[in-house]
Amino acid sequence: MIGIKLKELEEYIKTIDEIEPIRFLETYMKQIDDYLKEIPDEQLEIAEIFNKDLIELVERYNEKRIYKSIVINQIYNFIINFSRRSAIESRAALLGIDKTLYKKEMSFLFKGKTL
């Protein structure tokens, strides 16, 4: 049974990888927008703190005179990778796959290998 679920997860990952990253992000953000409508106020307050932390981080690197294009590129790559992992983890949860069961297999999937 777990093999079938892992295979389905693998297919989902392949589907994600075939989509242009910016298109994947756009689609995933629409899903997140729906989810954010139900977020408790406490989480939104934490989000504001997180936003301030991000601003401070970017400003610190601006003070170090790092090119804005580098900052943008690094943030973009981080968001794409973080979103991809989040989407995969969400799909695994929907399939009822415990993270400890697919962690080893995921390392192969993230490297582009098949099960």
Image: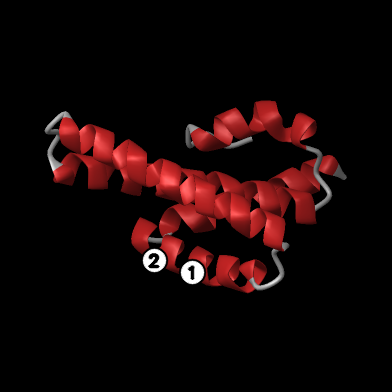
Q: Is residue 29 visible?
A: yes
What residue is drawn where x is 50% and y is 56%?
16
Quarter containing the N terminus? top right
Which residue corresponds to the image point at 70% horizontal and 47% vertical from the top-left?
Answer: 7
Q: Is residue 79 shown left or right of residue 102?
A: left
* Helix, strand or loop at mark 2: helix
Callouts 1 and 2 close, C-beta under 8 Å? yes
Q: Which residue is mark 2?
A: 23
Mark 1, secondary structure of its residue: helix
The numbered dot on residue 27 is 1
Q: Residue at x 78, y 48 (%)?
A: 4
Count of numbered marks: 2
Residue 9 image point, x, y percent: 67, 49
Residue 66, x across and y down, in percent: 15, 34
Mark 1 belongs to which amino acid?
Thr
User: Local crowd at mark 1 within 10 Å, few (<14), some, or many (≥20)?
Assistant: few
| Mark 1–mark 2 distance (CA, rounded to whole Å) | 6 Å
Visible in this render: residue 77?
A: no
Compared across the picture, whether 87 is left or right of 52 comes to: right
